[in-house]
Image (tube, rainbow, N blue to C red):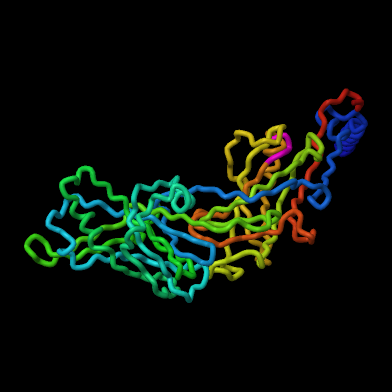
Amino acid sequence: MKRILSIISAIVIIVLLSSCNEAPTDIGLSFIYDTVSVKTISSDDMQFITKHSIRKMHSSYINMGGFLIGKADDYQSMTFIRFQTLKDTFKFIKPDKIISSTVKLKVQRYAFGDSLAPLAFDVYKNKKIWYPSTTWDSVFKDPADYIDYSKKIGEFNQVVPLTDSGVIITLDLDKELISEWLFWGDKHEEYVNTGIAFVPNANSRNIRKFDGPALNKSGAFFTEVFVKFYNSKNEVDSVIMKSAMEYSISDAPEHSDKYDIVLQGAVQYRTDMEFDFTSLPDNIAIHSAYLELKLNKEKSRFSNYNTDSLRDNQIVISYRGLDLKDTLSAIEQKIGSNGTKDKDFITYKFPRFTYLLEQWILHGGKKGIASLHKAPIHYEHFTVDKYVFYGMNDPNPANRPRLRIVYSKRPDYNYQKGGKK
């Protein structure tokens, strides 16, 4: 029996060994004749980054959870606020019936500029309604007809300490304006409350952030006007009007060096980087691609949150394609990659740049534009901090943006049997 089993085993082994001499199957043939070779290339070897330019973008919204007021050198922020319209009018309330009218605001810890200097701003009545499309230039340059400067209706000029919980501040508001808000007169059906403007004055040395409501934010602080008055029975009474709409806009000077990469919140300076990958071979698979940027701390300007660990952690890259004529295509901007701060607190890395590169190779003719901006929305709209990164023409190559790509040639499946292509 043992002899029979030994003979059968020997026959099986001979058959298996003989089959190894057969020609490779169709499935395996292409991998033999198209050996995969992984290669690494970077912007040190090829000039993938062809251009970058600074762009000022206006993207603002109402009631975003806070607002900015103040001035620090040439950096400025102001805010429009409209308060709730009360359902009932108080026809007996004339200015002489108002005991006091006080605005209450909550100042957060964020401070840009000299945090030890007074927070200084004036309050004015608005001439007309403002919208999220309203820009700094339209308010202060052309047509510059939003604010009624003929009469200052309130002011504030005090040092506001930095505390984690925030500080409540108050200021008196003009009684005639309050009487107008409460007592609409015979034309109350036509009356429109245009709200008030908080504008920094010449004494301002800092920009502060204030708390405010947002649609997805619970427990938010509402700026409010508290009015004490004598009612129709000549008794002391009171009413509170909370903020209904808050809208903040900011301005900052243009960056002097066009060769830098600049990102700034509130004012919303972004940088567009143009890429050209036509030097890469066709029919390649991208295994990884990541971009590195280095922060120039000397040119940057930060708020009181300026320590390495507290500095903004994220930068976002949105992407667009380029057509063959190097003009912007109609492809909508999409988020492509998040850049995170490295442990040296200077280098920002974008490890998911692979996705952008693949999109441009497949759909953009190997060209594309990456738009860099602050993130998340808190840093995009409510911090004035200016981040300056070294550009592609910096004298020190080690400081320039660096893109590293790992790729391989895809197998060629166009072959003839027998191994001949």
Quadrant of the frame with the C terminus = top right
Identify which residue is drawn at 20% across, 43% down.
189
Q: Label the magenta part by its dominant secondary structure.
A: loop
Residue 400 on image: x %, y %: 75, 57
Q: Is residue 134 left or right of residue 96?
A: right
- Does 7 sit above or below residue 148? above
Instruction: From the viewer's perspective, tell me whether residue 182 is left or right of residue 280.
Output: left
Residue stretch rendered in magenta on the structure: 364-368
Residue found at x 56% / y 62%: 385
Q: Position of residue 247 (x, y in %)?
A: 41, 53
Q: Is residue 156 magenta?
A: no
Q: Position of residue 43 (x, y in %)?
A: 79, 50
Using the rendered image of the protein, determine whether residue 11 is visible from the camera's viewpoint: no
Visible residue check, residue 306: yes
Q: Along the horizontal axis of the image, is 140 left or right of 301?
A: left
Q: Quadrant of the N terminus?
A: top right
Q: Residue at x 73, y 37 (%)?
A: 366
Q: Is residue 212 above or below residue 275?
A: below
